[in-house]
Image (spheres, rainbow, N blue to C red):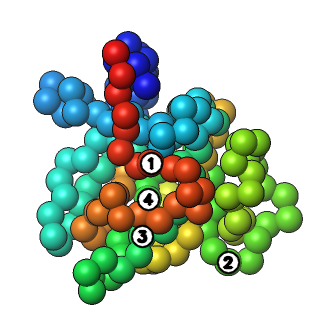
């Protein structure tokens, strides 16, 4: 991604956070991560996030999902004998469609990104609207997509090790690559 694109997406994410009533410090705004997952398809697959704290005991983040944007299917495995991340998603603004392991829904609300269709395999749908939350157990396959106006989701979890997440799509690189 180019620096100019990142600045524009950060600005849009800040607007969505503001709409949700979430205020960032200037330092937090400067560190807002734009993750295109190395796919170069940020509009359909990616995520914007700010990590407030991440220690060996707990983690807190805000996730900003643009309209129709999807965070690709992944799981949080055991790392160095430590159970994978358990996370609770609480919708703050907009609507998010979360898909986890379980009984699949015959028709889902999300539109699976065409280029990555084979890499989406779980279809138990959980719809989260403002004030609703759902807890995802460790090592559980999941993915999520924002509704038509986007979504802001607070994530509360055990220790986050994003670099150890296992994505169903082997082409995904979690760390962003910035070019000028």
Q: Quadrant of residue 40?
A: top right
Disc 4 crowd rating (10 Å Cα; few below 14, some 14-19, many 20+) is: many
In terms of secondary structure, where does tag 3 sit? loop
Residue 91: % across, % down: 47, 50
The residue that mark 4 highlights is: 89
In terms of secondary structure, where does tag 2 sit? loop
The residue that mark 1 highlights is: 173
Residue sitting at 41 percent across and 49 percent down? 174
In terms of secondary structure, where does tag 4 sit? strand
Q: Earlier in the sequence, mark 2 or mark 3?
A: 3
Q: Earlier in the sequence, mark 1 or mark 2?
A: 2
Q: Earlier in the sequence, mark 1 or mark 4?
A: 4
Q: Does residue 27 lie above or below 52 as drawn?
A: above
Q: Earlier in the sequence, mark 4 or mark 3?
A: 3
Q: Nearer the viewer, mark 1 or mark 3?
A: 1
Residue 62: % across, % down: 34, 45
The residue that mark 2 highlights is: 102
Residue 75: % across, % down: 48, 68
Mark 4–mark 3 Cα distance, whole angstroms, equals 14 Å
Mark 1–mark 4 Cα distance, whole angstroms, equals 23 Å
Q: Does residue 133 lie above or below 179 as drawn?
A: below
Q: Nearer the viewer, mark 4 or mark 3?
A: 3
């Amino acid at each position: 991604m180019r620096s100019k694109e990142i600045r524009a997406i950060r600005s849009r994410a800040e607007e969505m956070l503001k709409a949700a009533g979430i205020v960032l410090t200037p330092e937090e705004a400067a560190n807002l991560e734009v993750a295109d997952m190395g796919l170069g398809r940020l509009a359909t697959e990616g995520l914007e996030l700010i990590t407030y704290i991440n220690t060996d005991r707990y983690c807190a983040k805000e996730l900003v999902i643009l309209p129709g944007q999807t965070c690709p299917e992944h799981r949080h495995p055991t790392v160095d004998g430590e159970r994978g991340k358990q996370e609770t998603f609480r919708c703050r603004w907009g609507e998010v469609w979360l898909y986890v392991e379980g009984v699949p829904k015959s028709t889902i609300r999300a539109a699976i990104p065409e280029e990555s269709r084979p890499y989406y395999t779980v279809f138990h749908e959980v719809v989260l609207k403002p004030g609703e939350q759902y807890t995802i157990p460790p090592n559980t396959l999941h993915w999520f997509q924002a509704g038509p106006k986007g979504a802001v989701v607070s994530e509360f979890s055990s220790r986050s090790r994003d670099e150890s997440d296992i994505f169903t799509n082997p082409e995904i690189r979690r760390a962003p690559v910035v070019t000028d």
